[in-house]
Each structure stands twice: as structure tokens, then as C-alpha cells.
Amino acid sequence: MSNLLLRAITGAIFVTIIIGSILYGPYAQLGVFSLVTILGLNEFFSLFKGHTIVAVSREIGLFIGLFIFFILVGISLEWIPVISLVLIAPLFFTLILSELWKKKEHPLINISVLFFGIIYVVLPFYLAVDLNLRNDQFMPSVIGMFILIWTNDTFAYLSGRAFGKTKLFERISPKKTWEGTIGGIIMTLIFGWLIGAYINQGHELFWMVSAAIIAPCAIYGDLLESLFKRSLNIKDSGTILPGHGGILDRFDAALFAIPFFYSWSMIYSYF
């Protein structure tokens, strides 16, 4: 019970900061999400500190990741021209040349981890910022997205504790159950309908489809993060959020769900 209370308090503060920054304005959100991106990149590359095979540079990963993040955000905010995107490719290829001097046994693995970490962390957080800049609904769609992600997480956890018996994916996440998963999906669909019917009226189809997309994506994101941690034999990606672990632990579902929701939002707005 004490752990549940700690999770609830930390979660409430976390949600307040994320939602508050989005509502306050794009620059407030940019400040918060820039910090989250820095922490997320640092956590990801720190996972491999002392690894017997992977020898990726945390400093290079942070530099490239933040450079790309601010290039993309600068374009979205119209601070810099779109042509600035051409700087990303040569930067990548120049910095991975460092593998020539490292004298490590697995350069391809190191480069792959470097690329994946940047894409896995930077792209979703950038898309969340860009999505808010494109908002055309009463309640910002990025807030609705986070509400549905957190609804799925919360009710999957509560349903699993109350009714969980049948393991979902025991090899990767022994505590997750089908009962919890189904409970999370049902409540996500209900909340999606509520958002479309009572908050962002006139967008019922958008939010019902969004809920149907976000629920499974959030589950896969959670399982993917669990797979990473199990393969590295660690419990949490960090300790910055008491009761939750690290930034990657708290955003695991969002990191996978955001790109899918963003794509659906762009398709919906196009038609």
C-alpha cells in the first residue's frame, strides 16, 4: 500500500507538470520536454555503462540526439528554415567515425545502439511538441493522447491487481496478465468515447479510433521496455521518479504510442 501511495503521489506530480506545460503554451512545453529528452537520452545510454559487448558513447549520443531534437523543433517553430534538416545526415556519419579509433570488437552493434537510442527517445518527444503546435481542438489532442495512454496504464495495473490470473507475456513481463490488459483496453475505449462525445465534440470518430490505436501501442511500448531491461538484467531505467523508476520507465508506453497517434492525427486532418 505504501508503494501504491508513493506511485500515486509521484504520478500526480508528473501528470501536473506534463499537462500544465502543454496548457501553458508551446514554450513551456518545449522547456519540459527538452528536459525530459535530455534525461531520457542519458538514461538510455547509461543502461550500457560497463556492458561487456556494447560500448556506446553517452556523450556522443546526447550531442547528436539533442542536436536533432532542436533542429526539428526549430523548424516546427519556424525559428530556422527547413533546409536545416540537411545537417543531420552528415553529422551522423561524421560522429560514427569515432568507431575507427575506439578499437572495440563490435562497432556495428555500437552504431546500431546509438542510432536506435536517438530514434527511440528523440522522435516521440519531438512529435509530441509538434502535435501541440498543430492543435485545432478544444482540448489539445496531445493532452487527450496522454490521457488515453495513462488510462490504459492505470486500469491495466488496477485490473491486473484485482483480477489478474492469466499471464500475458510471462517471458518478458511476469506480472502482466490478460485480465489487466483487457481492463486497460476497455477503459481506454470508454475514455476515448467520453473525450469525443463531451470534450472535443464533433471528433467522436477521431477519438474512438485514437483509443483503439493507443491501447495496443501502449501495451507494446510497455513490453518493449520490459524486454530491454530484462535483456540488460536491470529492474528500472533510473531512479528519478520514486515508485516509477526512470523517465524511460514512465514514458515506455508513450514512446511507442506517440508516433502512431501522430500519424493518425495527420491522416485525419488531411481528409
Image (spheres, helix red, strand yellow):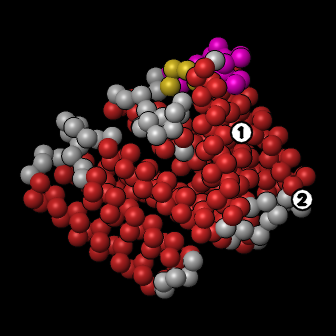
Lateral position of residue 92 relative to residue 8, left or right: left
**Residue plotted at (74% across, 53% down):** 144
Query: To which residue does mark 2 refer?
Result: 201
Write the start and end of the magenta stretch as one range.
158-170
**Residue 181 visible to the viewer:** no
The amino acid type of the residue labelled 2 equals Gln
On-image quarter of the C terminus = bottom right
> Which secondary structure lies at badge 1?
helix
Q: Is residue 183 above or below residue 18?
A: above
The amino acid type of the residue labelled 1 equals Thr
Density class for disc 1 (Cα within 10 Å; few <14, some 14-19, many ≥20) is: many
x and y, in percent, of residue 48 in the image? 28, 41
**Disc number placed over residue 245 in the picture, else none:** none
> Which secondary structure lies at badge 2?
loop
Query: To which residue does mark 1 refer?
Result: 151
x and y, in percent, of residue 158 in the image? 69, 25
Lateral position of residue 146 relative to residue 99, left or right: right
All told, the count of numbered labels is 2
